[in-house]
Image (spheres, rainbow, N blue to C red):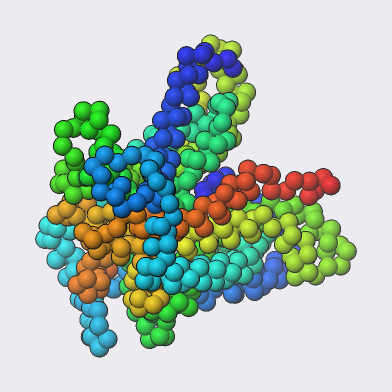
Amino acid sequence: MRTRPTTRALQYLAVLCYLVFLAFPLLWLISSSLKSPQEFASITPSFLPKHPDLSNFSDALEEQGLVRSMLNSLQISVATTVLVLVVSLPVAYALARFRSRLRPVTNGWILVSQVFPVILIVIPLFLILRPLHLTNTIPGVVIVYMVWSLPFALWMLQGYVAAVPRELEEAASVDGASRVRTIVSIVMPLLRPGLIATAMFTFISAWNEFFFALVLLQDPQLKTLPLVLARFVGAEGQVQFGPLAAASVLATVPSLVFFAFLQRRLTSGLLSGAVKG
Amino acid sequence: MSTATLTAAPEQAGGSKRPGRPKQNREAIFLFLPALLPVLLLSVYPLLRGIALGFTDARAGLNVDTNFIGFDNFAKLLHNELFWDSFRIGLIWTLSVTILQFVAALGLALLLNTNLKFRGVARTLALIPWAMPPVVVAIMWRLLLHPTNGPVNEILQSLHLTDHPINFLGDFSTALPAVIVVGVWVGMPMTTVTLLAGLQGIDRSLYEAAAVDGAGAWHQFWYITLPQLRTVIIAITSLDMIWNFNSFGLVYVLTAGGPGGKTMLPMLFAYNEAFRYGNFGMAAAMGDVMVVIIIVFLAFYLRSRLRSEA
């Protein structure tokens, strides 16, 4: 199809508008994180910092609790990710490969868990975890995150499992490999892109999560990064924009880095040559 | 995120014809086991108990008696004007964000589906909002919309669109629209990617045939693109609606429901009821009403959409 030059120009203009809308806020945040307090005091803010430096970042890192909360978030996100992978792989395999009665039940649960507002779940969770002494603990948050990341992880992984050609498994079982052996040495290696993608999504959602953490973690020592950032804002009036912006940038970096990897994964083919080769 | 969800949904029904189903079933159950206990304990049970809590007078605290009180909470809610206000705000928020998100995302997806240069870069950039923590998004937009330091006010003033700085998030009339814009910003990437995946799945030959018949771009869009995208559109708008109705963190940090309750989404209202005032039963009752509303809403939406297919 040929496109007229004017249409083409309008299309580029439209894309540009979209990109400004979508990317400008983040650029402004980054620029703010490099500005000095004097610049924030000026009435006409400029897009680029006049004397960019990293002092906001060092100020933010000296801020009480920020580094601690980063470590908490990291610990929680890594533990959640590992647990989710371990638990979801067998289930995803069963969902994609067996026509068992558990399949419609699981898919129903995945749907229901998306529809229900978390407020309904968080109160009973709180009541269940308290007698187990798991409120206000990192393991408590981790198992909650694990369960609530599962629907999406399963949904994603079963698609990847389904894409692994059944013939490969059948060939392995003809050669005498057991089911477990087949999963470990045939399916898992082929699933690596899917597992990596699932791991990253799980990590990002645990790293970004706010609501469950807000309810389940009261101890200042245990607060996660989003909680600490939200508290900075709460104390408005004395809020220091520079360090706040710097801390926000730091909180975004892990998600963006993982996301950059994912982006490539999602575009490259999943099974390049596994069957043909 | 939902590219994988919506396009790679599994549909192969393997192994049913082979003998030995009982064995397969047993094997399947074995594979399910590690997930079963945590899911039952921390997802299924809390859901059921959460629904049931709405019919009790449960309160926060360690040694509080909880009694079954039937529909008392719901009767009280009926007369609670603040609650209804919050629902009205929730509906405005949900519908505006979902519709604007969809329109904006469809536009972007159509653009990214053409053979423009740099569309790979554009697609990556367009996804950035999705990866950011909601709390950071809220902080960022507070900086952007700040009455004295924010660039938005600066730009509006230099274009002479306003002569005094607007306190977007603090003003009664602008708070909800401002929050809606942020909501659209956050949710657009996901919707765009999903729609783009749908667009790329449309058979090229349909367009070629239409072009031979002399259909213009608008006709092609209206009679090929939209009908072909139907399932994807229904799926993603339903999900968006649910997510938006249930959203919490973003607005909690942006405005905390203020000013004067103008952005008090139902989730925020119920959160305050539960964890500020300790009325667990009442908050759960609100949650129940939210579930019913979502289900009724979805039922109507899906029915009307699916009927028009016939």
Task: Give me the residue at 40% from left, 76% from top.
Answer: A222
Relative to B261, does residue B47 appear above or below in the rendering?
A: below
Task: Give me the residue at 22% from left, 48% from top.
Answer: B169
Q: Position of residue A155 (x, y in %)?
A: 55, 56
Q: Is residue A128 in view from this perspective?
A: no
Question: Is B310 positioned to the left or the right of B251 in the image?
Answer: right
Question: Quick one: A232 or A12, which is closer to the camera?
Answer: A232
Task: Give me the residue at 42% from left, 48% from top.
Answer: A52
Relative to A72, does residue B88 appear above or below in the rendering?
A: above
Q: Is residue A258 in view from this perspective?
A: yes
Q: Position of residue B215 (x, y in %)?
A: 51, 14
Task: Give me the residue at 37% from left, 49% from top.
Answer: A35
Q: Position of residue A19 (x, y in %)?
A: 44, 35
Q: Position of residue B47 (x, y in %)?
A: 38, 69
Question: Quick one: A75 or B48, which is closer to the camera?
Answer: A75
Question: Is B222 positioned to the left or the right of A234 in the image?
Answer: right
Relative to A217, does residue B207 appear above or below in the rendering?
A: above
Question: Quick one: A242 or A24, which is closer to the camera?
Answer: A242
In the rendered image, the residue lying farthest to the right is A175
Question: Quick one: A231 or B9, which is closer to the camera?
Answer: A231
Figure quadrant of residue B292: bottom left
Query: Which quadrant holds the N terminus of chain A?
Result: top right
Question: Is B1 positioned to the left or the right of B304 in the image?
Answer: right
Figure quadrant of residue A54: bottom left
How many numbered marks appear? 0
